[in-house]
Image: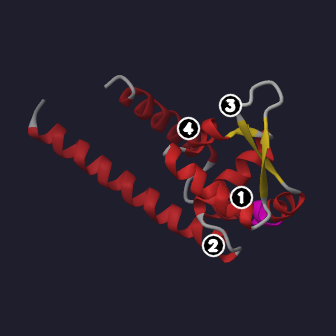
């Protein structure tokens, strides 16, 4: 490993981090304008698109520490956007279910959210997006080896 390769790796990390931060800040603005924080939105979006989820599994699906899930679910429950439901087959398992108000909110926010992401990624054409997806997946999967 030579110094030039190390510097290139550092530059890649910085560029990737800055691009993510710039996109994320802009996308989060839309979410926050609708009275949610990004984590609350992620939980509602997961429930809307994937259906009821065991509380214990939500964190792994939206990349959030399990201890934080209880807090987020409590907040969404207080807002009337989701409810907890016990599993009839296993009393140790509790599911999060999106409410009708939660569905209505996601149906209002999600189209604008996806349009905004599309607008923000227009600097890349379709082929470049495909290449970026492949390369970033390759990078992410390689990290799991460590």
Check disc 4 and report the residue beneath it: 60
Check disc 3 and report the residue beneath it: 92
Report the residue at 73% width, 60% height from top: 77
Check disc 1 and report the residue beneath it: 114
> Is residue 122 visible in this depiction of the protein?
no
Say which label, 2 or 3, has the lower sequence index: 2
**Cα separation between marks 3 and 1:** 36 Å
> Is residue 79 visible in this depiction of the protein?
yes
For the record, the magenta segment spans 108-112
Element at badge 2? helix
**Cα separation between marks 4 and 3:** 18 Å
Give the camera-side residue of 143 and 120.
143
Looking at the magenta stretch, what is its main secondary structure? helix
Q: Quadrant of the C terminus?
A: top left
Q: Quadrant of the N terminus?
A: top left
Judged by depth in the image, the label closer to the viewer, 4 or 3, is 3
| Magenta-drawn stretch contains 68 | no
């Amino acid at each position: 490993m030579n110094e030039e390769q190390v510097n290139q790796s550092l530059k890649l990390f910085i560029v990737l981090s800055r691009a993510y931060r710039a996109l994320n800040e802009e996308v989060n603005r839309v979410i926050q304008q609708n009275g949610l924080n990004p984590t609350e939105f992620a939980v509602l979006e997961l429930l809307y698109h994937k259906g009821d989820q065991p509380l214990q599994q939500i964190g792994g699906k939206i990349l959030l520490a399990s201890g934080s899930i209880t807090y987020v679910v409590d907040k969404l429950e207080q807002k009337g956007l989701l409810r907890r439901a016990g599993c009839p087959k296993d009393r140790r398992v509790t599911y999060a279910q999106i409410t009708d108000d939660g569905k209505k909110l996601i149906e209002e926010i999600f189209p604008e959210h996806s349009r905004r992401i599309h607008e923000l990624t227009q600097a890349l054409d379709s082929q470049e997006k495909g290449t970026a997806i492949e390369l970033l997946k390759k990078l992410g999967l390689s990290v799991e080896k460590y």
